[in-house]
Amino acid sequence: MRRPPSIPPSAALAVGGRVDPAVRAALDEARRIRGAWEAALEAARADARAAATVRLRRRLDALDRFGALLRRRLRAEALELALALAARLVGESLRGDAARLLEVARVAAPPGAWLRLRLSPEDAAALRAAGLPPGVEVDADAHLEPGDIVLEGPAGRVDARAATRVAALLPPEPP
């Protein structure tokens, strides 16, 4: 079956070589509606892009805040790990060295007499073997690491553990 030949719209609407005024009015109205529809569509697209941009900006801001929080936490954990490592190294450097342990205790002690030194069992044995100053007792404390010293006396208690000594070297944290 053959299809009839197609006729261009401009020729199809012509009656006697002229476009009927009603058809022209309908075409003009259709063009106006189409223009309004295209303008509304473009406005809707622009609104959607703007809303998507706002949502995207909010999500990016949230990611930035999360990244900053993560960086602060990682920095704090890295510092904590570095402090633990430094304390371990300081403690290991004093392990069993009676003269250095006594020097650390002397520097950490407040003015006045101190009566008791609490040390790791290994360090306490080394200090006892080296001889103690008169009036000083040494207690082995299994909770202390090598190089840790806790002084006790009439002036109170002084925490001279390796971790405490290393942490004292750091500047104060900003608020």
Image (cartoon, rainbow, N blue to C red):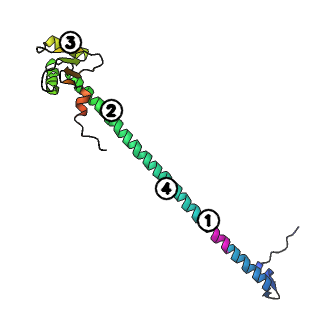
Q: From where the camera sits, is residue 147 visible?
A: no
Secondary structure category for the residue under label 1: helix
Q: Do labels 4 and 1 touch, CB within 8 Å?
A: no
Image height of 137 relative to 8, above or below: above
* Residue 85: image location, x then y, percent: 29, 29
Disc assigned to residue 44: 1
How many residues crowd around disc 4 within 10 Å: few (fewer than 14), some, or many (20 or more)?
Answer: few
Q: CA distance from mark 4 to mark 1?
A: 19 Å
Q: Amino acid at mark 3?
A: Ala
Residue at screen point 27% across, 16% down = 141
Secondary structure category for the residue under label 4: helix
- Residue that sits furthest to the left in the current view: 134
Along the polypeptide, which appears first: circle 4 or circle 2? 4
* Residue 168: image location, x then y, percent: 23, 34
Residue under label 4: 57
Along the polypeptide, which appears first: circle 2 or circle 1? 1
Residue at screen point 80% across, 81% down = 13
Q: Quadrant of residue 48?
A: bottom right
Secondary structure category for the residue under label 2: helix
* Residue 78: image location, x then y, percent: 34, 36
- Residue that sits furthest to the top in the current view: 129
158 sits left or right of 44 in the view: left
